[in-house]
Amino acid sequence: VSDIEPILNGNRLALARLLTQIENETAAGMAALNTLFPYTGRAHLIGVTGAPGTGKSSLVNRLAYFYRHPPTGDAPPLKGGEAAPEQAAPRKVAVVAVDPTSPFSGGAVLGDRIRMRDLSGDPGVFIRSMASRGSLGGLARATAGLVAAFDAAGFDTIIIETVGAGQAEVDIAKLAHTTLVLEAPGLGDDVQAIKAGILEIADILVINKADRPGVENTERALKNMLNLAHPGPRIFQEARGRYREWAAETPAPGAPELALWMPLIRRTVATEGEGIPELAAAIAQHRSFLEETGDLQKRERIRLQSELDLRIQDALVTRWQGNTHYDAYRNTLEQLVRREISPAQAVARLVN
Ligand SMILES: Nc1nc2c(ncn2[C@@H]2O[C@H](COP(=O)(O)OP(=O)(O)OP(=O)(O)O)[C@@H](O)[C@H]2O)c(=O)[nH]1
Ligand SMILES: [Mg+2]
């Protein structure tokens, strides 16, 4: 049994070592994750995705700083009558930057670097950048592992930054409770330029660099897309349909399939910190929605079930590879290429 006490007690050095072990998928790392698992499931996981250079890291810095220094006194009501973020004690914030195109602390203006230093000297903040990895599956597994370690170590808010690049961002969205998709004016002023897929994963659409011209066009394009697409096939609805049979889940009679969350749109200027309290309020609003509708448990269940399914596939393939001679595989492939056997016959021969 691995010694997880230092992790649970918030020892940063032990945590840093464990994160490296998890990233490298060592036996010790995997064993520790098994032991830590019962202590996970408490953190609010916030995914931040968007095209390279949209300002994700700058925004994450600001958000982390905001959570560490919550406004004091009675917060004024925010625009639109939304609840102000709760005046709780500072939360412990972990940041996982997945495969950043630029280092997390790099490429930032001076003001950002000062902000970063404020964060890095703060024991309530832990920032971890993850190097590029070979396989998407490996990336998703390692990210989930890092998040679990932070969760067990008592970080109540975990922010995951990932570059918007197709499947990876969808996987991260499944991992997160609340997903922010960043857009920047000038990059996608017309509807075509904004990837349709983002609407399936975005809980909050953030128009960062709102100090730039074209912000009105971007907001209009996003609103139009939302109106066209919503209610659309968002990933959790789809996944729920797919998994219901296996989960033996019976919806209450007359209950709606899933309460509908209309993605919110917020403007920010991450370099100046503008719009951050309003964004934090939107995140809190989404969190409350998840709790009140029971969606939090549903998402958690779907997440664990899809991880289980992926791991079953991995395990079965690995076992099959261990039981199959490469020669047999290659001969069968040759026969398939010569069209002497069909793909289905090839599988029947190799798997049975
Ligand atoms: N004008 C303006 N510039 C910004 C804003 N937010 C970020 N930037 C700048 O945009 C550049 C990219 O910012 P990052 O925070 O590194 O963006 P990113 O999305 O994390 O980039 P990658 O991780 O490389 O994909 C930096 O030079 C920032 O200073 C903003 O609101 N307004
Ligand atoms: Mg970045």
Image (cartoon, rainbow, N blue to C red):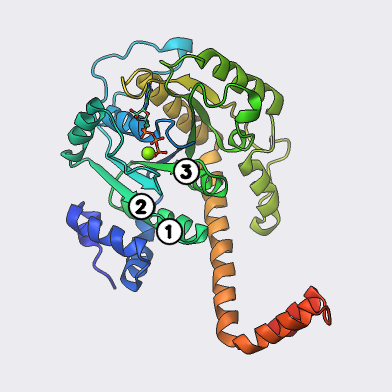
Q: Secondary structure at mark 2?
A: strand
Q: Earlier in the sequence, mark 2 or mark 3?
A: 2
Q: Which image quadrant shows ligand 1?
A: top left
Q: Which residue is mark 1?
A: 133
Identify which amino acid the numbered label 3 is placed on. Ala
Identify which amino acid the numbered label 1 is placed on. Arg
Q: Residue at x 51, y 60 (%)?
A: 137
Which of 152/213 is in front?
Answer: 213
Q: Earlier in the sequence, mark 1 or mark 3?
A: 1
Badge 2: residue crowd in 10 Å (few <14, some 14–19, many ≥20):
many
Q: Which one is closest to the eye, mark 2 or mark 3?
A: 2
Identify which amino acid the numbered label 2 is placed on. Met
Which of 202/248 is in front?
Answer: 202
Q: Which residue is mark 2?
A: 130
Q: Which one is closest to the eye, mark 1 or mark 3?
A: 1
Q: Quadrant of residue 8?
A: bottom left
* In the rendered image, the vertical position of residue 275 relative to residue 165, given as above or below: above
Q: Which residue is mark 3?
A: 176
Asked whether the residues under the numbered discs 1 and 3 touch, taking CB atoms below 8 Å apart as contact, a structural biologist would say no
Badge 3: residue crowd in 10 Å (few <14, some 14–19, many ≥20):
many
| Rendering coords of residue 153 (x, y %) | 28, 51
Asked whether the residues under the numbered discs 2 and 1 touch, taking CB atoms below 8 Å apart as contact, a structural biologist would say yes
Q: Secondary structure at mark 1?
A: loop
Badge 1: residue crowd in 10 Å (few <14, some 14–19, many ≥20):
some
| Rendering coords of residue 165 (x, y %) | 53, 44
* In the rendered image, the vertical position of residue 305 relative to residue 76, given as above or below: below
